């Protein structure tokens, strides 16, 4: 009897031990899954996209920035988390043969300006001071929310810049410049003020690699279109408008991003290979020594996409009764109201039709001096027919 009790107790202890081991194994698997899901440590994404060039011959720089803007929006970053700075408005430039459009390809199929572009800083608002204020958060209290970078220590930030540059500087508006030291100090302020978790810096300009040489803050990954001493070349010339449509590096980066979707597992190491010297002519560069993670483990969507906060609960919430009430009230409202087609922004403002429509015929008006000339002709004919001697019979 005692032996039987001993065996049963041992079996119970063994079963409890197995159950505990299976439970701990399941818990560790859940923790591994959660760690993998939150491996980047960020909970929100931001993008600061800057074109620093003015004038029509710099059309490609505006197209570069708008193309990146389109890509990050497609991958999930909303306008509320994008700060877009354009130094010139090519869509409304008098030289633009197709007003309200900016194209990034010579086939003119993709209008990157579109009808939903939200430009936060435009024209002469794009200055070195305003750019640094956006990064560091040192902006006047009256600044609207759309012009603020409201990031925190869980934010992954993409900063893209394009324009004309040189060894250690990038020009703004052809009137001032930002140096690599000023940019590095701004990133350090952001780190000290806990304004980012990880930062991806991309620059497409001549001697672009010189702009990230002075970086010293942690968790920064940087890419450039050219090395020190090299020019960053343009691409896609369009004889119809007389300028190039894009720069080579940005063109191939965007061609790469077009294959990315929000669930893509493509990593940053793949982005480093998109534009070899055989395509770009210049030598693209990158810097990862300040970045804590291996680029192979960093997804493209960690910076070009967007994450959403999710709360997991084990509580059961019954919504059936409330939903039934809502459905009944909705049906009553439908019966009371007349059916009406929903209005869409594109229907209200048919941009494509506006662009391609024929010019409206103007109402005819006599040219200036026409009436006066007509009276002069009548008087000349009268004098030639009747002469001055018949004037006394008229007056």
Image (cartoon, rainbow, N blue to C red):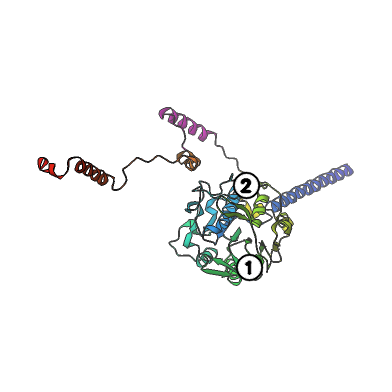
Q: Is residue 336 above or below residue 123?
A: above
Give the image quarter of residue 295. Answer: bottom right
Check the picture and name the quadrant holding the C terminus.
top left
Q: Is residue 191 left or right of residue 3?
A: left
Q: Is residue 335 above or below residue 363?
A: above
The spot of residue 110 in percent (x, y) is: 58, 45
* Residue denoted by label 1: 211
The spot of residue 393 in percent (x, y) is: 10, 40
| Image disc number at residue 385 | none
Q: Is residue 177 above or below residue 373?
A: below
- State the CA–CA distance, disc 2 to disc 1: 43 Å
The spot of residue 312 in percent (x, y) is: 62, 47
Helix, strand or loop for the magenta stretch, by majority: helix
* Residue denoted by label 2: 312
Q: Is residue 268 magenta?
A: no
From the viewer's side, name the closer residue of 353 and 194. Answer: 353
Q: Nearer the viewer, mark 2 or mark 1?
A: 1
Looking at this view, name the residue that lies furthest to the top: 335
From the viewer's side, name the closer residue of 331 and 145. Answer: 145
Secondary structure, mark 2, is loop
Looking at this view, name the residue that lies furthest to the right: 3
- The magenta region covers 318-344
> Badge 2: how crowded within 10 Å, few (<14), some, or many (20+)?
few
Q: Is residue 55 left or right of residue 12?
A: left
Res. 94 in view: yes
From the viewer's side, name the closer residue of 88 and 346. Answer: 88
Q: Is residue 334 magenta?
A: yes
Q: Is residue 374 left or right of residue 122?
A: left
Secondary structure, mark 1, is helix
């Amino acid at each position: 009897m005692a032996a039987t009790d001993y065996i049963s107790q041992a079996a119970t202890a063994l079963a409890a031990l197995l159950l505990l081991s299976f439970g701990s194994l399941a818990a560790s698997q859940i923790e591994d899954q959660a760690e993998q899901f939150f491996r980047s440590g960020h909970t929100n994404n931001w993008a600061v996209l800057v074109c620093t060039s003015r004038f029509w011959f710099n059309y490609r720089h505006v197209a570069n920035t708008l193309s990146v803007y389109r890509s990050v929006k497609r991958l999930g970053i909303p306008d509320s988390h994008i700060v877009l700075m354009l130094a010139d408005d090519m869509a409304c430039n008098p030289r633009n043969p197709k007003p309200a459009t900016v194209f990034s390809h010579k086939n003119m199929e993709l209008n990157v300006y579109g009808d939903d572009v939200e430009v936060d800083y435009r024209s002469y608002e794009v200055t070195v001071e305003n750019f640094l204020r956006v990064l560091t958060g040192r902006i006047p209290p009256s600044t609207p929310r759309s012009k603020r970078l409201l990031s925190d220590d869980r934010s992954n930030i993409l900063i893209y810049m394009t324009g004309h540059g040189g060894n250690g500087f990038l020009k703004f508006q052809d009137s001032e410049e930002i140096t690599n030291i000023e940019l590095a100090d701004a990133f350090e302020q952001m780190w000290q003020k806990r304004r980012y978790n990880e930062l991806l810096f991309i620059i497409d300009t001549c001697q672009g690699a010189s702009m990230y040489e002075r970086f010293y803050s942690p968790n920064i990954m940087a890419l450039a279109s050219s090395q020190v001493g090299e020019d960053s070349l343009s691409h896609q010339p369009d004889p119809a408008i007389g300028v190039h449509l894009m720069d080579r590096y940005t063109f191939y980066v965007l061609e790469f991003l077009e294959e990315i979707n929000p669930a893509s597992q493509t990593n940053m190491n793949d982005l480093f290979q998109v534009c070899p010297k055989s395509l770009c002519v210049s030598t693209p560069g990158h810097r990862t020594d300040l970045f804590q993670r291996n680029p192979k483990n960093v997804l493209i969507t960690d910076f070009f996409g967007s994450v959403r906060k999710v709360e997991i609960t084990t509580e059961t919430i019954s919504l059936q009764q409330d939903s039934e009430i809502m459905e009944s009230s909705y049906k009553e409202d439908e019966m009371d109201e007349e059916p009406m087609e929903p209005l869409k922004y594109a229907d209200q403002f048919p941009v494509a039709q506006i662009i391609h429509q024929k010019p409206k015929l103007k109402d005819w008006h006599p040219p200036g001096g026409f009436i006066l000339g007509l009276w002069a002709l009548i008087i000349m004919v009268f004098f030639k027919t009747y002469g001055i001697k018949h004037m006394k019979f008229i007056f």
